[in-house]
Amino acid sequence: MRVLLLPSIPYGPLERLAAVGDHPRPGVTEELRRDHGIDVDTLDPDTSWKNPFGRMHPFFRGLDPLRSLRVLIARRNYDLIVSGNDGAAVALTAARGLFWFRTPIVIWDLSPAERWRVRIAAQNWTIPRSDGVIAVNDIQKPYIAQRWGKHVPVITVPHWVDTEFYHPMPAPVPGPILTVGDDAGRDYPTLLGALENLSVPASIRTSVPLTLTERHQSVTILRDRLTPRAFRDLYANCRFVVVPLRPDTRNASGNSTLLEAAAMGKAVVVSDSDGIRGFVRHEETGLIVPANDPIALRAAIERLLADPAECERMGQAARELAERTASPGVFAERLAAAFRALAR
């Protein structure tokens, strides 16, 4: 079986960095080929002048007209075309009738658009005309059925984590509490409420604009871009990870952070949300608290601070859970089943 992957960001540079241990792997092509007989070719979006959208948001970058034309004309010998997010699928589904292109086109890791009008219009055109969606959590299934109809096939393949790149590392001294994340699903106002007058240092790695007050003297906001190794060091040196989330997000908000923290052997405190329940086990790998509740979030933080042994036990259980349910081999098996179900 042959699959063509059209990512919305260039995978080639990430693969080269991963080869020398400077970056987590962007995919599981090795496992798919070796264990499941699926060859995956990747055609990156162009970031040069040849792509008029090459320097724009990944959604627009994925449109890449020249890449789409190459696929429609010269890339017909595949069993499945996989659009990383929905950008590439927009151009392909719009032009497939003109080129008599019949290879199934599926969207992987859909980002539901709620307010972005251009993307809403693009998804309204593309998704009903695609041959399926590979979702990263089950909450997208009813959303897709309600918005575009039950005839759109949806298969859930949960997120994965590179458990070789992210692994437990000894910390010389107890570090700060850590929060990371830039997406709109993060609930930073609730987090800042929970961190008021906290005696233990807390670090927030984000590009989201935040305002600290005199009640946040122990809080540090990290805005500099970090290499993946430096990012991994943040996890390694922290006590545990806090993931404040809004309860109504349909994106996979927080999933990557939860998996990276788990792979690093760190306990988590996370706001309850439909999209996270498969990644955290309450009282086993971390603590789940009600969303929009700074008092409950503060209580969970203080509980882990007061019991380092419990925090370490949860972190070890989180690492074991990541290995069993989100390692590259497990993910490749699930992805292979989805590819075969959606291919021609």
Image (cartoon, rainbow, N blue to C red):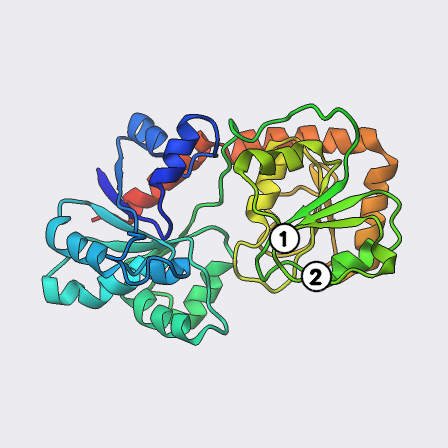
Q: Residues within 10 Å of mark 2 (few under 14, many from 20)?
A: few
In terms of image quadrants, where is residue 118?
Answer: bottom left
Element type at marker 2?
A: loop
Residue type of the residue flagged with mark 2? Leu
Using the image as rendered, state which of residue 218 and residue 130 is in the foreground. Answer: 218
Could you tell whether 184 is left or right of 146 in the image?
right
Q: Which residue is mark 1?
A: 206
Q: Residues within 10 Å of mark 1 (few under 14, many from 20)?
A: some
Q: Which residue is mark 2?
A: 210
Using the image as rendered, state which of residue 95 and residue 31 is in the foreground. Answer: 95
Using the image as rendered, state which of residue 8 and residue 216 is in the foreground. Answer: 216
Element type at marker 1?
A: loop
Question: Whole-percent x and y of residue 102?
Answer: 15, 57
Q: Are marks 2 and 1 in contact (CB under 8 Å)?
A: yes
In terms of image quadrants, where is residue 286?
Answer: top right
In terms of image quadrants, where is residue 182?
Answer: bottom right
Q: Is residue 239 above or below residue 123?
A: above
Residue occupying image coordinates x 37% and y 32%: 16
Could you tell whether 144 is left or right of 69 in the image?
right
Residue occupying image coordinates x 65% and y 36%: 235
Q: In this orientation, does residue 71 appear?
A: yes
Residue type of the residue flagged with mark 1? Thr
Question: Whole-percent x and y of residue 109?
Answer: 42, 53
